[in-house]
Amino acid sequence: MKSAETMQRVFQEEIAALQTVSNRLGDLDALIQSVFACRGRVVVTGMGKSGLIGRKISATFSSTATPSTFVHPAEALHGDLGVISNEDFVLAISNSGETEEVIALIPFLRRRGVPIAALCCKKNSTLAEKCDFLVHLPVEREADSFSLVPTCTTTAMLVTGDALAVAVLEKRGLTREQFAELHPSGSLGRKLLLQIGDIMHAGEKKPLVHLGMTLREAVCIMGEKRLGVAFVVDPIAPEKLLGIITDGDLRRLLSQNANPLGERVEKVMTADPITVDSQELAVTAVNMMQNNKITVLPVMQGGQLAGAVHLHDLLRAGLG
């Protein structure tokens, strides 16, 4: 069999295993409610490949507003049991349901009254019998020729853990904004939390030119500030935006006039330019720039000129 065909077969076998597990999940409402009601953390544990899957499941819980940690069962037995409190909920993962280190944790958990859920592929196993909640994963074989390499089983564990975390997340009823607060550096967090004022060019970085200046002087300031734009203001009231000159305006003027650099800025500026408020979401500026085919926006705050935001700033922030 060709290598590509082998890969296709593995995909199909793992998909089939997931379908089998999905069809036999049964009613898990009590489990979901118990995790939702947990006042402590969801403590995930497992050995070997199950432990690796457990680390990812724990990370998924934490990123979806359910505090979670992974505890290695062997390390727990040698001094780390204090991490688990009586307000926690334990999710134990084991293919066979007979993993010695995981089974050895059960008496301690029982003494503390900690509820236990098991992700287990063997229904008639010690772990399955001793847990409070069982999520049976009826995976009969792995995807390799010898049915030895953890593949279908670990995929089933991972997807089931993801499904449980998402079910609890939806039960919490988090809004997109609340979810974004858990991921302030992620793409969704930036789109829902980052404001124009957080990334604008302000203070001395503003490309200001005054009424009465020549276009030549404006070009020098545009080159210095390196935003491809100049904001025209009254020298007596520099917080009031009167107009804008862009590098696109310069190109058009040069194509129409052999020597426009002596013109006063007020004669060549675009009055009443499009602006954006500093408290608007940064993603709003992206949409405004795309819709109006511009790359720079004056930023206003309380009706006064506060700064400038360039499309490049937004792209660097991951909003493009």
Image (cartoon, grey):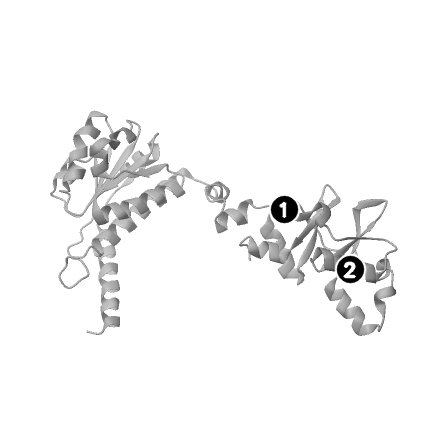
Q: Position of residue 120 (x, y in %)?
A: 19, 45
Q: What is the quadrant of the C terminus in the image?
A: bottom right
For label 1, the residue is: 280
In what element is the residue under mark 1? loop
Q: Residues within 10 Å of mark 1 (few under 14, many from 20)?
A: some
Which is more toward the observer, 210 or 34? Answer: 210
The reply to whether residue 25 is in sight is: no
Identity of the amino acid at label 1?
Answer: Glu
User: Which one is closest to the eye, mark 1 or mark 2?
Assistant: 2
Residue ID at (79%, 55%): 243
Q: Is residue 183 above or below residue 262?
A: above
Q: What is the quadrant of the N terminus in the image?
A: bottom left
Which is more toward the observer, 115 or 33? Answer: 115
Give how far apart the Cα atoms at labels 1 and 2 are: 31 Å
Residue ID at (26%, 41%): 28
In what element is the residue under mark 2? helix
Which is more toward the observer, 215 or 278? Answer: 215
Is residue 188 found left or right of 24 in the rendered image? Answer: right
Q: Residues within 10 Å of mark 2 (few under 14, many from 20)?
A: few
Q: Position of residue 9 (x, y in %)?
A: 22, 67
Could you tell me if the residues under marks 1 and 2 are in contact, i.e. CB atoms within 8 Å? no
Q: Position of residue 295 (x, y in %)?
A: 66, 60
Q: How many marks?
A: 2
For label 2, the residue is: 220
| Pointer 1 or 2: first along the chain | 2
Q: Is residue 320 above or below residue 96?
A: below
Q: Is residue 259 above or below residue 36?
A: below
Q: Position of residue 126 (x, y in %)?
A: 12, 39
Which is more toward the observer, 184 or 171? Answer: 184
Identity of the amino acid at label 2?
Answer: Cys
The reply to whether residue 204 is in sight is: yes
